[in-house]
Image (cartoon, rainbow, N blue to C red):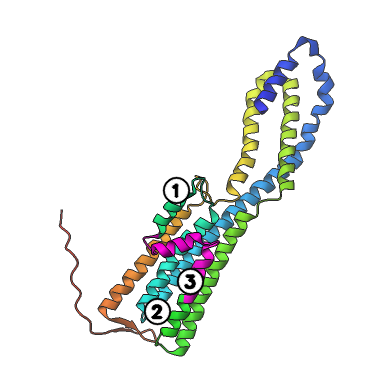
Amino acid sequence: GLAAWGLSLTWLLRRPEVAGLSELIGPYTALSGSLLTPVSFLLVFRIGRAAARFWDARAALGAIIEKCRSAASTSALTYASTPELRDQFSRWLSVLPIAVKNDLRALDASRSVARGYRLQQLCPVLTEEEASELLDSKRGPILVLNRLRRVCFAANAASETDPIERAQALRSINKVVDDLTGAWGAMERIGNTPLPFAYVAHLRTTLVLYLGLWYVSMLSRFGPVVLPGLLLTSWALLGIEAAAVECSSPFQRKPNHLRLGRACSEVAQCVAQTLAESACEEARGVRYSRGGEVQVAAAAPIADPVPQHEE
């Protein structure tokens, strides 16, 4: 649009029948200078808010990864006496980032294809019935968080440890679940709260008005030789607004958005490693006493791993 505007002005100002047009529009071109200051403030505020929203979204995603790691290690130690409930807690914990990602991203145009893809992501961890229930839920993260709390209370009731230790463990894991709920809420708030339409509309209107008057001013004074520079500068200014739009809600599958899928894989790998190390300690008969001392009970010898062939 601006390129067509610039070419039209260039052709119009070079017409001999409008030779006095430059002097006629001279007083109006001074308006472009007066608009520069408000446009600058509006653009700085716009890109600043977009960067803050992007950083807040990244911090919330990092909090989900951190709290999932903490919950996995705490549950592996606290629920060692109830391995079935511990594994169930770990399964739902590794599914939580996937549920958050699906909640932040709307289904694609082909809903059947998108649902099939999401089922493939969940079925290695959940049963097909559980995965379908999660996808059919109105808010998937709420279902997962509720399951985590139920497993916490069930494992705490089935534990045979000291009542004080059980209360402390339940409080600790429940606090982690609360933090996970808050991190998801922060991401949801960023995704559902764009900048006010009045501000965005005013910024874009003012920016286009400034660029239009600036083209008139520069082309009437210097001629078509400055048109490439005008187009390049316009691209830079409009690019600020485009970058702000791109980064203000960074949860979609786009190059400049957050890698939510990578975060899901990271949590799943951390939970799997925690469970594997706990299984090794159980096989060796390692137990932790109340004072923190390590006790090794008599256990069956562990078979040596498959030897690796030397190259």
Label whose residue precedes the other's in the sequence (2 or 3): 2
Label whose residue precedes the other's in the sequence (1 or 2): 2
Up the image or down, 219 lies above or below 19; here it is: below
Viewer-proximal residue among 49 and 200: 200
- Write the residue at 61% across / 38% down: 239
Query: Residue under circle 3?
Result: 147
- Write the residue at 39% across / 79% down: 79
- Residue 271 placement, left or right of 142: left
Q: Nearer the viewer, mark 2 or mark 3?
A: 3
- Residue 213 placement, left or right of 96: right
Q: Tag on residue 79?
A: 2
Q: Amino acid at mark 3?
A: Arg
Query: Residue under circle 1?
Result: 113
Q: Position of residue 241 (x, y in %)?
A: 64, 41
Q: Position of residue 232 (x, y in %)?
A: 62, 30
What is the chief secondary structure element of the magenta stretch?
helix
- Residue 208 placement, left or right of 28: left
Up the image or down, 89 lies above or below 217; here it is: below
Q: Position of residue 83 (x, y in %)?
A: 35, 77
Up the image or down, 165 lies above or below 144; here it is: below
Secondary element at image label 1: helix
Q: Tag on residue 293?
A: none
Q: Nearer the viewer, mark 1 or mark 2?
A: 1
Q: State how far apart marks 1 and 3 are (Cα).
A: 27 Å
Label whose residue precedes the other's in the sequence (1 or 3): 1
User: What range of the chain is rendered magenta?
Assistant: 123-150
Q: Amino acid at mark 1?
A: Val
Quadrant housing the N terminus: top right
Q: Position of residue 44 (x, y in %)?
A: 68, 46
The stretch drawn in magenta includes residue 135: yes
